[in-house]
Amino acid sequence: MARAADRPVVAVTSSFDRAAVPEDLADRLHLRWAPPVGDARPLWTVLDEQTLREARAVVVELASVDEDTLGRAPSLEAVIVCRGTPSNVDLEACRRRGIPVLTTPGRNAAATADLTLALIISAVRRVDEAERWIRSGAWSPDDQYYPYDEFRGPQLADLTLGIVGLGAVGREVARRALAFGLRTLAYGPHLTASNAPAGVEVAPLDEVLRLSDIVTLHAPGGTATAGLIGSDELARMRSGAVLVNAARASLVDEGAVLESLRSGHLAAAAFDVFWTEPPAADHPLLHLPRVVVTPHIGGASDSVIGNHSRAAVAHLVRWLAERETPVG
């Protein structure tokens, strides 16, 4: 084991699977574990002053690495973010200081894809409606066959799924959709027939919207995709189609979705993300009959913690090897 004075301090505030850290790596680092931070509070308010001052690397998930934090961390050499998009990090401030920001893309791709398929099935087969109905005590012995007619829905293999955004999550959704027998179309700004998964048909966005019975969104957030699905795009979708969003609320114009649902043009929708979280109890989206909602739980899986822990460890191994390699 290296002497304590020779081991760089690495502060960890992310949820983490400590078993992912191999013994030889643990011997070369001075890992300081903080209780996992479940919100975007600044990192300097979480770590004690000495740890922040001595830290050569930090591993965060939700804690904010802002200008104040960086000013209090003069020894910092690397920021590892256990998420795909480091929206909690002041990237410009890190760039000015020459501090690389490393992420763990794809950590929750499989888990989010699982939830997406659950939302699709629930919306198409009206699972949540049927559950609420039976729990209400409405099923009468005198009308045993009513639910068979009332909650009738198509089988997935007769439908076309359109995937908007074929990154890590979108590709996992496609893999599952193809296994269910869905015809699967996809749109992405850099997607071509040559780089699409086998079985996925690449098409322009307008065609994906026009031909799909179900449209599921998996594009990244940001100004470039804000309002990607608005009134015009919803109007291009098939009458009676289903819209699913387990990606970013900003991709969709909220008012346009509500209008389309109320008019019946959209038959149903399913959302794991909301424009304001949590949504108000009286938000109309929560009270429309054919809307499935979950509370932003796409990545809520213990497997995700293991995935991002292993990815963070890989970053630490490379970072340590680089700093231990003599220059020249």
Image: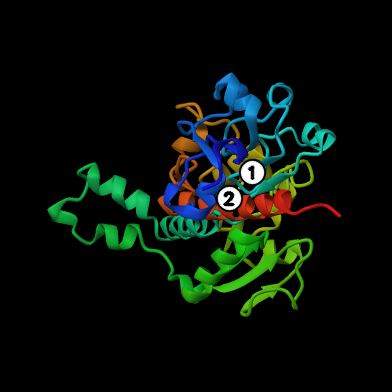
The scheme the figure's colours follow is: rainbow
Circles 2 and 1, Cβ within 8 Å, touching? The answer is yes
> Which label belongs to residue 64?
none
**Helix, strand or loop at mark 1:** strand
How far across and how far down the image is residue 291, in percent?
A: 47, 46
How far across and how far down the image is residue 27, in percent?
A: 51, 48
Could you tell whether 180 is left or right of 218 in the image? left
Could you tell whether 269 is left or right of 193 in the image? left
- Residue 41 appears in the figure: no
How far across and how far down the image is residue 46, in percent?
A: 54, 24
Name the residue rendered at 67%, 30% in the picture. Answer: 65
Name above or below for residue 204 compared with residue 72: below
Name above or below for residue 260 compared with residue 111: above
Question: Which is more toward the observer, 83 or 36?
Answer: 36
The amino acid at mark 2 is Ala
Name above or below for residue 268 compared with residue 56: below
Could you tell me how far apart the alpha carbons at marks 2 and 1 are, in whole angstroms?
7 Å
Question: Which is more toward the observer, 134 or 104?
Answer: 104
Name the residue rendered at 64%, 29% in the picture. Answer: 54
> Which label belongs to residue 80?
1
The amino acid at mark 1 is Ile
Name the residue rendered at 61%, 79% in the picture. Answer: 199
Label 1: how many Cα within 10 Å (few below 14, some 14–19, many 20+): many
Name the residue rendered at 36%, 55% in the picture. Answer: 127
Q: Which residue is tagged 2?
A: 312
How far across and how far down the image is residue 303, in percent?
A: 44, 54
Q: Earlier in the sequence, mark 2 or mark 1?
A: 1
Total numbered labels placed on residues in the image? 2
